[in-house]
């Protein structure tokens, strides 16, 4: 079904959550079901809503192309389940998901690393293969055999983005940054991202953290976080928030205190920074020149897919959350076809041993799908986009870039 994805009203979200709590309708005998467990209510709902749009498009594409060929043309079905707004509700949702959908071939989610850590305790015990875009290194540090992390971990992203920023600043200003401000929340992805920065990245790059502010989301006001930055005069600011409501409040506050990204480089992290809702609520002037580190963004190879998504949904672009969900559904279709079975153990074994550069691999930077012994995608790499003229555009890596990055020459 084609629909325009917009922020839901509170009543709508409650209704959706109630619907998701009901047992699923009986599947046809040859249907194969995969689950999507994402936040569809609460502060992270926008991310889940966008993932759902990408996943539903993938389901339609697969079924319209003849279904699962390795299963005699069986149709692929999506079971959408809401995590709610806490780790506890995410874990409960995972248990409910398994109870109501006992024949799942696999599943993916939960977006926020804190939710993923909780939910995968449940899915791992059930032996259900699970794909996630969540960043926290802890997700795949637990010895689990059925959790596959398709995003570069937070540690990898932290170690890659800071040297890139240093090089970018040096090239634009002729000066090497020496001071950085850090503002982040205390969720698992942010904590995991910050750990290598504090442990060794700052030291390696000869950077001093002149501001290091940690908060519990969601924010009501960012004044106490942003005000100290003005006096500290950092060369750039790293913003480790995890939901677009907080992103907006923080970006607004920097502008109010005379420090927009056009004057002081602001660097966010995560797909929440590039959802259409940000453009609606913050406006393009507030967002202009903000750089964002991401685990994925549609490149030139998927221009046709991006255009179809925009036409289908009415959203202005095909983004981070949508392409991950689309790719995860396609990965399960590939694995089910390859295994010739919807048995979760066989599907998991197939994903564990996959090593491909075509098919669903084209939806990831580097076009390579292979997992190491921990379940981390080999060769996963960072993507950096920047808000330019009301739209997030790719500026790194160079083979994916559609625009050159902008760094304020007055910042250093």
Image (cartoon, rainbow, N blue to C red):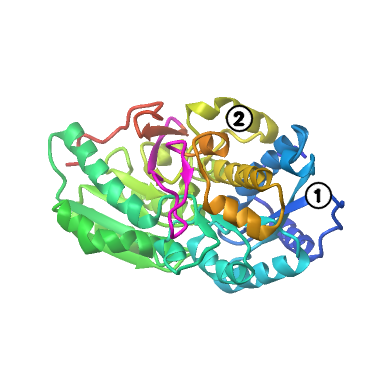
**Residue at 41% across, 45% down:** 380
Quick check: 238 left or right of 342?
left
Q: Quadrant of residue 93?
A: bottom right
Q: State the predominant SS element of the stretch in magenta.
A: loop
Q: In the picture, which quadrant includes the N terminus?
A: top right
Q: Work out whether residue 287 or residue 139 is closer to the camera in this orientation and state it.
A: 139
Residue topped by disc 2: 305
x, y percentage for residue 100? Answer: 77, 66
User: Is 20 rendered above or below residue 157?
Assistant: below
Q: Is residue 135 left or right of residue 9?
A: left
Q: How far is the residue under mark 2 from the one under mark 1? A: 25 Å
Task: Kindly identify the residue that appears in the image at 84 percent across and 54 percent down.
Answer: 27
Q: Vertically, is 169 above or below 348? A: above
Disc tally is 2
Of 401 and 342, nearer the camera is: 342
**Observer able to see residue 108:** no
Callout 2 secondary element: helix
Q: Is residue 367 magenta?
A: yes
Percent position (x, y) of residue 363?
Answer: 53, 37
Q: Is residue 355 visible?
A: yes
* Sooner in the amino-acid sequence: mark 2 or mark 1: 1
Q: In the displayed structure, does residue 199 sit left or right of residue 275?
A: left
- Magenta region, residue range: 365-389
Q: Position of residue 45 (x, y in %)?
A: 60, 56
Toward the viewer: 113 or 385?
Answer: 113
Q: Are marks 2 and 1 in contact (CB under 8 Å)?
A: no
Q: Residue at x 71, y 55 (%)?
A: 80
SS at mark 1 in the image: loop
The numbered disc on residue 31 is 1
In the rendered image, residue 172 lying in the magenta stretch gets the answer no
Tag in front: 2 or 1: 1
Q: Position of residue 31 (x, y in %)?
A: 81, 49
């Amino acid at each position: 079904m084609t629909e325009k994805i917009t922020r839901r009203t509170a009543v709508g979200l409650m209704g959706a959550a109630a619907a998701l709590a009901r047992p699923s309708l009986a599947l046809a005998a040859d249907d194969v079901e995969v689950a999507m467990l994402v936040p569809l209510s609460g502060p992270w709902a926008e991310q889940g809503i966008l993932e759902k749009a990408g996943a539903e498009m993938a389901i339609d594409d697969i079924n319209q192309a003849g279904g699962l060929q390795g299963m005699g043309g069986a149709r692929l079905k999506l079971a959408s389940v809401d995590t709610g707004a806490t780790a506890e509700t995410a874990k409960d949702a995972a248990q409910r998901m398994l109870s109501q959908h006992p024949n799942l071939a696999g599943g993916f989610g939960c977006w926020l690393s804190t939710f993923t850590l909780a939910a995968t305790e449940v899915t791992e015990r059930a032996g259900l293969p699970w794909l996630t875009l969540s960043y926290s290194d802890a997700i795949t540090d637990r010895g689990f055999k059925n959790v596959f992390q398709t995003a570069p971990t937070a540690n990898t992203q932290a170690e890659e983005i800071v040297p890139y920023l240093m090089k970018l600043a040096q090239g634009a200003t002729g000066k090497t940054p020496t001071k950085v401000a850090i503002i982040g929340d205390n969720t698992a992805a942010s904590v995991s991202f910050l750990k290598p920065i504090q442990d060794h990245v700052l030291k390696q790059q000869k950077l001093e953290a002149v501001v290091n502010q940690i908060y519990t989301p969601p924010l009501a006001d960012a004044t106490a976080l942003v005000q100290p930055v003005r006096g500290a005069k950092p060369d750039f600011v790293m913003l480790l928030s995890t939901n677009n409501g907080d992103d907006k409040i923080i970006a607004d506050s920097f502008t109010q205190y005379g420090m927009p990204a056009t004057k002081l480089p602001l660097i966010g992290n995560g797909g929440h920074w590039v959802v259409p809702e940000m453009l609606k609520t913050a406006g393009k002037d507030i967002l202009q020149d903000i750089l964002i580190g991401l685990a994925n963004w549609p490149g030139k190879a998927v221009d046709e897919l991006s255009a179809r998504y925009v036409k289908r949904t009415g959203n202005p672009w095909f983004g981070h959350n949508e392409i991950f969900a689309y790719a995860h559904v396609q990965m399960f279709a590939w694995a089910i076809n390859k295994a010739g079975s919807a048995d979760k153990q066989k599907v998991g074994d197939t994903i564990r041993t996959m090593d491909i550069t075509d098919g669903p691999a084209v939806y990831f930077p580097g076009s390579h799908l292979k997992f190491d012994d921990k379940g981390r995608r080999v060769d996963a790499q960072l993507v950096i986009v920047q808000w330019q003229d009301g739209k997030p555009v790719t500026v790194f890596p160079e083979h994916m870039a559609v625009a050159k990055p902008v760094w304020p020459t007055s910042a250093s």
